[in-house]
Image: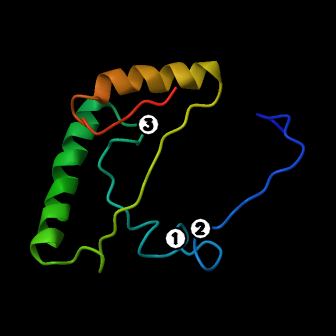
Amino acid sequence: ARYSDAKSVCMLEKYEDLATLNSKGTSNSQTIHVGDIETNYTLEKAKITKRTAKMIEKFNLQRGLQDKIMFAHQKMALGVGEKEVEFIKNRYEEFKELFPYLELWD
């Protein structure tokens, strides 16, 4: 393996069938990108993206559409290897004021 010397891997599915979340049309390509974990976004792009994403969120919440067409899910950005880990740490420092709910796990 490229990033591990693990001899075997066990995968567990949280839901009743395989890929019911990530491959579902209402979950995958329809996600609201806020800019918090999009690691290719600059801080400036994330500020703009957050503002417009919050407009969509507010619109849906005002109409009671939570858990109908808009769903909350956990998300995470990972750094693999020293270079990526350093990138994630630096990005966290830069973005934590804009997204105060971000957590850095080391």
Q: CA distance from mark 2 to mark 1?
A: 9 Å
- Quote the CA–CA distance across marks 3 and 1: 22 Å
Q: Which residue is mark 1?
A: 21
Q: Mark 2 or 3, which is nearer the eye?
A: 2
Do the CB atoms of the residues marked 2 and 3 lie less than 8 Å apart? no
Q: Quadrant of residue 61?
A: bottom left
Mark 2 residue crowding within 10 angstroms, few (<14) / some (14–19) / many (20+): few
Q: Position of 5 compared to 54: left or right?
A: right
Mark 2 and mark 3: span between their CA atoms?
Answer: 26 Å
Chain-order first, disc 3 or disc 1:
1
Mark 1 surroundings: few (<14), some (14-19) or many (≥20) residues within 10 A = some
> Which marked residue is nearer to the observer: mark 3 or mark 1?
1
- Where is residue 43? Give x, y as percent: 28, 30
Please report the residue visible at 57 percent of the width from the left and 73 percent of the height from the top: 15
Q: Quadrant of residue 101?
A: top left
Residue linked to disc 2: 14
Q: Of helix, strand and loop, which one carries label 3?
A: loop
Position of the N terminus, as image quadrant, is: top right
Instruction: Name above or below for residue 27 compared with residue 16.
Output: above
Q: Residue furthest left?
A: 62
Residue at numbered disc 3: 39
Q: Secondary structure at mark 2?
A: loop
Residue 89 to residue 54: above or below: above
**Residue sitting at x 24%, y 46%:** 49
Mark 2 and mark 1 in contact? Answer it, CB < 8 Å: yes
